[in-house]
Amino acid sequence: MEWILLIIAGIGEVLGVTGINQVNKKKNLWSFTLLIGGFTVSFIFLALAMQSISMGTAYAVWTGIGTVGSVLIGMVFYNEPKTFLRILFMCMVLSAAVGLKLIS
């Protein structure tokens, strides 16, 4: 269950970062709601997950989900480059997160 909470926290992180991008483009209620709501969900669920998962592992997986998710959102919705190296390094981040899960 705690890993599901951590995944939800990571998704909240992606939403919060997307909100930052939206605020930079257009300062409206929706952008600020996405920003504040995403980070609020993210921190609440991260705190809940850290009751059972060690701080280092939870933080590393949370930032990994946030990093990879934000890059994917940028590539799909904001026309950011889709180069081989970007995809390779995203895979490396994901494999590190999976490795931490396996040894926890």
Image (tube, grey):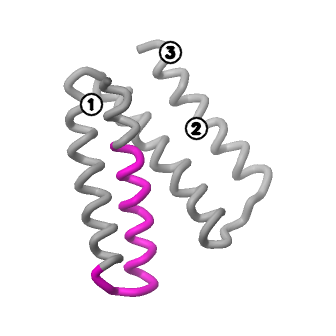
Q: Residue at x 65, y 63 (%)?
A: 75
Tell me residue 86's x, y (percent).
70, 52
Mark 2–mark 1 Cα distance, whole angstroms, equals: 20 Å
Magenta region, main secondary structure: helix
Magenta includes 26? yes
What kind of residue is marked 3? Leu
User: Does label 1 or label 3 sit earlier along the sequence?
Assistant: 1
Q: Which residues are magenta?
A: 9-29
Under circle 2, the secondary element is: helix
What kind of residue is marked 2? Val
Disc 3 versus disc 2: nearer the observer: 3
Tell me residue 62's x, y (percent).
40, 40
Quadrant assignment, res 32: bottom left
Quadrant assignment, res 60: top left
Give the residue number, with chain letter if any, for mark 3. Answer: 102
In the image, residue 68 sits, relative to residue 22, either above or below, namely: above
Q: Is residue 57 left or right of residue 93?
A: left
For the N terminus, the quadrant is: top left
Tell me residue 36's x, y (percent).
25, 65
In the image, residue 37 sits, relative to residue 11, either above or below, namely: below
Give the residue number, with chain letter if any, for mark 1. Answer: 49
